């Protein structure tokens, strides 16, 4: 009979591995089981197009990872994780050939927005600059579990963060600043009129100023690889090619921790309709490119940026998100794009480059957005298509097939619209616990939600630790 483990983790994404590491570092016996033949979840790196071109199929740029309280407490650099920073974290080009930017400097960012809004941007950032550590602790968590580290900053930021970005943007006089903030808010994959979207925009802006928007050398795969290395160093084990259909498939354990969608957890753990009300949000339509040359952006700032947002007005960005949320085909999508090979020469053969872009489409959408996406890129980089050597296209069905957590192609693993940004996957005092005393949820379907930061795994591990230590007593 196999020995009783302290914890079994189902799913080897960043949150599952983080939970496993945190329990193993406390001396618990932990094993991780992953259905696919490689670990990583939404942080994988693969040759999707041509030999030698290394692409990140999902997450690629990591402000929340480099600034994560969970990751910064771990010696991940010993296990191969190296951060590379572009000259500019973000550029947001406009039709006149200029661009708004997020630079490491607040002043440089402010000046790019024009003289009428530069002062407003500086004043908005001033109370929070230099406070990333406490803000990451206070906001990358379940808000009602524990007191904030910095109550004054928490309250000041919270008053701004709760607003929809469409309201927040009334502070600005010109479209450049409004478009920049709308583009940042769009990372929530929710309509711009949704509760809390200004908080998403501000956190991403502050991350750029505090910790940057870097990429891992070699690709996003370096993050889960480092976590797995640290887990093994503390006696944990990782099993791949192991699909779990029910708890009986797994070794006996005192706790089962799911880095999966809530619906998969309910199915495997036999919890019936426990998560029947979970709503999944709009999907992504993503294209990875092998490029003969860098993208020929008209705006010079975009040629130096790791990430480029494409959507010249807040109105156009809002319309694109509304269409995706309301089930309409994309016509003029808002795009989030990244060009990691500008700073990481391991991503492509010498002289060549990788690039990716994604827009938002309805959940489960089965159409082809390749043409509308490339026409949008061509608006700001004429001649782009002439430089494409190969492309790998993934719509919602492909994204869901690649990662079962992304139900219907929703890479946020659950809608972030309205109060769903805070209440994930359903209202509960401790959202990592379930109706089964030995079953826990640690995926980004639980707070603080989407992103490669490991914080959902961090707090799930705390819940497991309290339960197991309490039962021993």
Image (cartoon, rainbow, N blue to C red):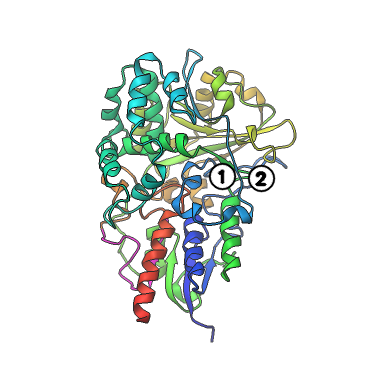
Task: Residue under label 1, please give it.
Answer: 57
Can residue 56 be seen by looking at this rendering? yes
Instruction: Give the residue displayed 61% in from the left and 19% down from the top.
Output: 383
Q: Name the foreground residue: 236 vs 297.
A: 236
Relative image position of residue 11 (x, y in whole percent): 50, 61
Residue 213 badge: none
Figure quadrant of residue 303: top right
Instruction: Give the residue displayed 66% in from the left and 42% down from the top.
Output: 54
Judging from the image, what secondary structure is the residue with disc 2 in? loop
Extreme residue toward the bottom, this view = 1
Figure quadrant of residue 389: top right
Q: Contact (CB < 8 A) between labels 2 and 1?
A: no
Residue 177 magenta-highlighted: no
Q: Quadrant of the C terminus?
A: bottom left
Residue 437 magenta-highlighted: yes
* Magenta portion: prevailing SS class: loop
Instruction: Give the residue displayed 30% in from the left and 58% down from the top.
Output: 276
Q: Which residues are magenta?
A: 428-443
Task: State whether residue 313 is above or below residue 131.
Answer: above
Instruction: Give the residue displayed 57% in from the left and 41% down from the top.
Output: 215
Q: Quadrant of the N terminus?
A: bottom right
Q: Name the foreground residue: 369 vs 100.
A: 100
Relative image position of residue 326 (x, y in whole percent): 32, 37
Task: Residue under label 2, please give it.
Answer: 47
Q: CA distance from mark 2 to mark 1?
A: 9 Å
Relative image position of residue 18 (x, y in whole percent): 49, 59
Extreme residue toward the top, this view = 96
Task: State whether residue 97 is above or below residue 79.
Answer: above
Q: Name the foreground residue: 72 vs 56.
A: 72
Q: Is residue 356 left or right of residue 49?
A: left
């Amino acid at each position: 009979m196999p020995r009783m483990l302290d914890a079994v983790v189902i799913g080897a994404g960043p949150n599952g591995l983080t939970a496993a590491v945190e329990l193993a570092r406390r001396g618990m016996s932990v094993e991780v089981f992953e259905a696919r033949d490689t670990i990583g979840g939404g942080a994988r790196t693969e040759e999707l197009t041509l030999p030698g071109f290394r692409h990140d199929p999902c997450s690629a740029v990591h402000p929340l990872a480099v600034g994560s309280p969970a990751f910064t407490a771990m010696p991940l650099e010993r296990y191969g994780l190296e951060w590379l920073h572009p000259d500019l974290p973000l550029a947001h080009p406009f039709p006149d050939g200029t661009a708004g930017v997020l630079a490491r400097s607040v002043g440089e960012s402010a000046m790019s927005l024009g003289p009428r809004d530069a002062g407003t941007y500086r004043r908005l950032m001033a109370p929070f600059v230099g406070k990333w550590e406490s803000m990451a602790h206070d906001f990358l968590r379940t808000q009602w579990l524990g007191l904030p580290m910095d109550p004054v900053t928490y309250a000041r930021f919270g008053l701004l963060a709760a607003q929809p970005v469409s309201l927040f943007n009334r502070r600005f006089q010109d479209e450049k600043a409004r478009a920049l903030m709308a583009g940042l808010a769009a990372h929530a994959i929710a309509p711009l009129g949704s509760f809390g979207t200004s908080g998403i925009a501000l956190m991403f802006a502050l991350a750029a100023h505090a910790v940057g928007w870097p990429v891992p050398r070699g690709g996003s795969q370096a993050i889960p690889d480092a976590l797995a290395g640290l887990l093994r160093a503390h006696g944990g084990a990782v099993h791949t090619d192991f699909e779990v259909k029910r708890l009986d498939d797994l070794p006996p354990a005192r706790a089962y921790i799911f880095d999966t969608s809530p619906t998969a957890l309910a199915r495997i753990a036999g919890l019936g309709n426990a998560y029947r009300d979970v709503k999944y949000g709009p999907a992504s339509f993503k294209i990875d490119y092998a490029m003969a040359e860098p993208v020929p952006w008209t705006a010079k700032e975009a040629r130096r940026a790791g990430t480029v947002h494409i959507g010249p007005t807040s109105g156009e960005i809002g319309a694109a998100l509304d269409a995706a949320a309301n089930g309409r085909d994309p016509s003029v999508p808002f795009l989030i794009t990244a060009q990691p090979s500008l700073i990481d020469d391991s991503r492509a053969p010498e002289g060549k480059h990788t690039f990716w872009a994604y827009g938002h489409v309805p959940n489960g959408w089965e159409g082809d957005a390749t043409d509308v996406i490339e026409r949008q890129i061509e608006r700001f980089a004429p001649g782009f298509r002439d430089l494409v050597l190969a492309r790998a296209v993934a719509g919602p069905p492909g994204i869901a097939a690649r990662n079962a957590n992304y139900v219907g192609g929703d890479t946020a693993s659950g809608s972030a619209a309205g109060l769903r940004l805070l209440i994930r996957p359903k209202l509960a005092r401790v959202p990592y616990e379930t109706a089964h005393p030995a079953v826990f949820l640690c995926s980004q379907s639980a707070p603080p939600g989407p992103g490669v930061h490991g914080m959902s795994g961090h707090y799930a591990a705390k819940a497991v630790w309290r339960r197991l230590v309490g039962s021993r007593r």
